[in-house]
Structures are given as structure tokens and as C-alpha cells.
Amino acid sequence: MRTRPAVRAGQYTALLAYLAFLVFPSLWLLSVAFKPPRELGSLHPTWIPKNPTLANFRQAFDEQPLLHAAFNSLSAALSAAVIAVALATPMAYVMARRRTLLARAASGWVVVSQAFPFVLVIIPLFLVLKELRLIDSVPGLVMVYVVWSLPFALWMLVGYVRAVPVELEEAAAIDGAGRLRTLVSVTAPLLAPGIVATALFAFITAWNEFFFALVLLKTPEKQTLPVVLTHFIGAEGAADLGPLAAAAFLATLPSLVVFALIQRRITGGMLAGAVKS
Amino acid sequence: MRTRALTLVLALLLLAGCSSGGGRDDGPVTLRFQSLAWQAESVTANKELVGQWNATHAEVKVEYIQGSWDSVHDQLLTSFEGGEAPDVIHDASDDLADFAYGGCLADLTDLLPARLKSDIPRRSWETTTFGEGVYGVPFLQEPRVLVANATWLKRSGVRIPTPEHPWSWPEFRQITRRLSGDGKYGVAWPLKEPVSATLNLSLSAGGQLFHRDADGDVTVRFEAGDEVVPRTVHDQIGADRSASPTTLGSGGSDTLPGFFGGRYAMVPLGFSYRQQIAQQAPKGFRWQVLPAPAGADGPTQGVSPQTLSVAADSRHKKEAVAFIDFLLRPKNMVRLALGDWMLPTGAQALSDPALHTAKDDWATGTALAAHLRPAPAQTVRGYPEWKDKVATPAFQEYYSGAIGLGELRERLEKDGNRVLARYQR
């Protein structure tokens, strides 16, 4: 059935409005990042800076070790994403395919674990990490990120595994494929979008995370980007707005780049027509 | 919101006392100094002073750690609980009460050198004295001042106040009325954090709000002196229309575009906001610093100075205090003050000519230093919760006209005393 032009126009208008809503903060950040201090204090701010300057970027790099902090963030976020996915994928497969009491209990635990706010776990977590001598260490932080993102990653992946028709695995078995071969050649490729989406979730969660990094890392050289960004903020909400916007804009780039690179992998449709129902 | 929730949960943990132990005692002494300096000049001054210390003290090295005002309370709470707090801690005196009473900070009474004790006035020491102990060295402070559009004020012909002859609160109200009209306002109160601003300015009118009895217990009583400032602000917004109603939820920085754009004649701000104003003001815009209005008690107002404390768990308290003493030598204190655009607490530093210049109105602020007193809530346990749960919403509703003075009083006293009582059992 053809969509009427008026309805289609309405749909596009709604989509554009939604896009504008999503993009507004990023564009504003970009605009502020290139504005000199005098334009920041203007009563009638403009989208495009009247006298664009790179001074905010220079100041941000001069005052704070942004590149080093970005490297710390990147290594922590990548490690956390890889480990979380490596752990969650086989767990999710078992939970989705085996309808045992243990699998059901594990699913329940995943849901319950989401209910704990981090304010309840931060002190015990700090003490445990201290016992393990993992305070002020990036591996300690990665461990926390993995633990923090694992339940949701697991939950996501269980859904993706359930979406892979079990009949495909049965067909592979009839054709003589063993369990491992079935997993590697049949299930894993179909799960790829889900794995990528889960990895992206774990990466972005870790990349943006502030409080654990603030509390667990003491040495300035180990601090991550979100922690370093707060160094542009003073007492009572006063802020060095230009350099803060410049640094914050740069901090959003890796997430955007990672997302842009792998978004095609997330799109569904791979299973279309795989099974006749 | 997240910060508040965390603060409340962790504050309960803190009531049980801070953990002991931790610290390091291996090899040459290394002190960790967490600084909250954030403006470029201030960070540079701090780092250079640390460098100077390290160059002349081979046996005691100081490691500079950059902290953030935005998260310092939560970060310190967690660090104290885990026994991993820095040795030397930069904070503000109104953040110290629970840490001091919780045993997280070292009592410096017997560690402080005589020079430092005598250089900083008694009223400043009171801001870091909790019970019998001294838990921090107050070193930088700022009065709340009126930053005014100098051209607008001159054109209007109003009397320009000086630290010696400030406006009274009724005079201030009258003048803001005179300056208002045609969509313009005499004043814009940035009251995102209404409690500290109101309480600190209320000292000028004799407001005290927190009353301590012989047993040391504190009760809230909203009396005549406490009413002057809130009523002035309320009437400027509601009755006179001489104060912008839209800035009630704003921070100080948010009011600057309107100030530069000629919408407000004056903005009450902390003295250090001059840095932002000097940087952002349009070319040709003339601004000046005026003293805040005075009441029955003169231009007195409350402040919560920036402080340097030593962690109770530190194994090197003597060395930490020696470093603080070095950092706060008069010459160094002046550098730190200039870097943060604030006033030093030390008498010798305050007399430095660099702080008495007409440029950026340093002299006006310096003249007000003698009138600064400890903020009323300074040593009250449970103040953060009282502020967040009771006082902030009550003042916000009063200023916006949603409730009257009677209900404001009832909420501050009745609900407030219930909160404070829990901390005094």
C-alpha cells in the first residue's frame, strides 16, 4: 500500500525535528568551541562564530594532557568492550539455548543486578579493589567497567541469540556439522550485528564513564578524558567555557567515529528469508 | 541529583567514622597534594610552587594531583573510606564539617607554626575550627559584591557606594527600582544556589539563623534579621519588578550575557567572577565593583574560605603542614590569590600593593576583607542535607512567589530542625 504524500511529508518533518533535537547539543558545542571569550558573553549568540578562533583548542591542549587522557580512555574502553563481549557471548548462548533452572536463575540475576545504583556498590568495590591492589590501576578500572556493563551486555546478547532460529543450527547438525562448527560457521556470523552493537554499548559506556575513573585513579598520568574535562570547571559552576567546549567536542569524536565505522554491521536484515515459517 | 544521592548515602557511611590505616611509609617521603585550582594562572602558580618546594626539599617530595570542584566532596568521601586520601587536601571550609567530625582530617592545632597562626586572623580560623580542633588552614576567600554597569549607574545619577559607605538594603531596593523599566532591571540575582547567598548576606542585617545552645546543639530560628535579605529580593522580583525573575535559577556565569547586553544594571557575584568579566566584557563596556548592601551590622557577610587540610591517615602530617606553611608564605599566598582573583586570608599577604590597585577593582574587594565572617552554617552538622532537602526548595519557592514569608519560616524551622536533630542525637 502506498503511503499518502501528506503522511510521508509529516513523517519526514517529524524525523527532521527529531534529528535536530539530537544534533543540537553537538552543533552548539562545536559553535562554542570556536568562539572567542567575548562572543561567549554575548546576549544574542550566533550559531556561526563571527570571529572563529582555534585559541580554545590551543588553550585546552596547553592546560590539560588531553591526548594522554584520550589514550587512557581509549585503552580502558576498548579493553572493557572486548572482554565484556568475550565473556557475555558464550554466557548468552547458554542462557538462550538451555532452558534449565540455572539459566533461568542467571537471567533473573541479570535483571536484579541492574537494580543496584552505583552509590551502593562504590565503597565495597573500592575496598575490594584495594585488597586486590587494583586501586590506581587501569586494569582495575577495566575490571570495574566489565563488571558494570556485563549484565546489560548479557541481556542484549541473549535477545540476539534467541533471534537466531534454532532450526538453522539443527539443519547444520543434520548436514553433519559438529557443535563447534555450527557455532563458528552458522551462529556466530548471524550474531555479528548483535556482538557489534553490544561491543559498541560497552565501549561508549566505558568511554563516557566519569565517577569510577575519578575515584579509582589517583595518578594524574592515568586519568581518563571525562575526569580531565572537569578540570575546566571551577567552584559554584563557573567554567572555562571555550576550552571546555573544545575539549568536550574532541572527546565526542571517537564515539562518533567508532559508531560511523561499524554502524552498517548493526543493521539487521541478515536473517531475512533464512527460515520459512 | 546523582551527586546529591551519592552524598547522602556516603554521608551515612561517614557517620560511622573514617577507616584508619593506609598510607605509605617506604623510602623518601612523598606527599600527595590534591589541588582544586582550575584557572590557568592559578594552576600555573600552584605547579610552580610545588616545583620550588621539590627543588629545595630533597627529603620530602610533593606530587601534584589535579582535583575538581565539581566532584571533590564525593571523591574525598570515597577516598577517606578506602584509606586512600591525598595527604594535603584543597577544599572549602563549608565542606569540612562532616569530614572533621568523622575523623577523616587531622587536627592541626599543635602542628601549625606560630607564623601561620598569627598571620591569619581569628575570624578566619573559626571557619575551620570544629569542636576543639582546627581541621584546615583557610587561605583564600571572596566577598559577594555587586558588579555594576558603570556607565548606566553614572548616567542615572545614583549615589555610588564605597566600602566605607555602602548602600543600606532599603536604599539598594530604592535604587534598583529607579534603574528599572522598559524591560530592563536594576539587578539580576543569580540564585541557582539560593541558600549560601542568602545566609551569607543576611549577616549584614544581623541574621544568624543557626543558634547553638550551651550543649552545642543547633536549632534553626528565622528571626527579624534573617528576613531582611530574602524579603528585599522577593519584593524586588515580585512587587517592584526591579529584579529579573528569569535569573532565579541561573548561575553567576549565566547572567553575564544579559549584564553585558545592557539588560541588568547590576549582578551580585563572587569577587572572583571579575576574571570572567574582564575576559568576556565587550570592548568599551565599563564595569565596576561595588560593595554588597549593608544592614544593621554594617557590610558584614559570611564566607567559606578555600582551605588546605591534612588527611588523618597521612603518615607524614608534620611534613604536610610544613608544605602548607611554605605554600602560604605571604608572597606565595599573594600569587595564589592573584591567580584565583580572590583575597588572601593572611594579613601580610593582604597588605601587598598588588591587591590594592584600582585595576579590576582589587582595592574595593580588599577593603571588604575586614568585614568577612565565617558563614553561618559553617560548623553545623547536617547542613548539606538541610540545604538540599529543606532550604533550597523553600527559598526558591519564596523568591518565585509561590509561598509567603510565613511558610518559608515554618519550613526552614520545622522541617529544618527535624533534619538537624538527626545529626545531633
Image (spheres, coloured by chain):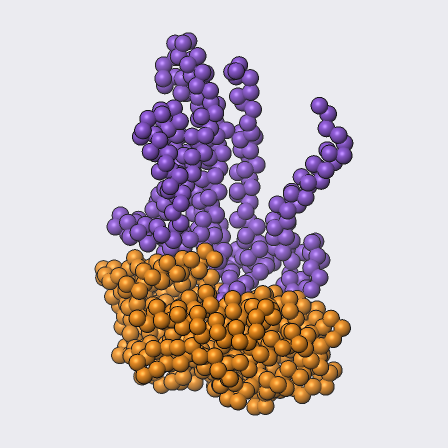
Chain colours: A purple, B orange
Q: Quadrant of residue B211?
A: bottom left
Would you say residue B28 is visible in this rendering?
no
Query: Which residue is pictured at 61% across the width and 45% down the height?
Result: A22
Query: Which residue is pictured at 68% across the width and 74% down the height?
Result: B241
Would you say residue B89 is visible in this rendering?
yes
Name the residue nearer the viewer: A238 or B265. B265
Instruction: Residue at the far top: name it.
Output: A175
Above or below A266: residue B237: below
Query: Which residue is pictured at 64% across the width and 82% down the height?
Result: B173
Q: Quadrant of residue A174?
A: top left
Above or below B276: residue A262: above
Name the residue nearer the viewer: B208 or B425. B425
Image coords of residue A244 (percent x, y): 55, 57
Name the residue nearer the viewer: B285 or B161. B161
Query: Which residue is pictured at 42% across the width and 57% down the height?
Result: B5
Q: Quadrant of the N terminus of chain A?
A: top right
Image coords of residue B63 (percent x, y): 36, 62
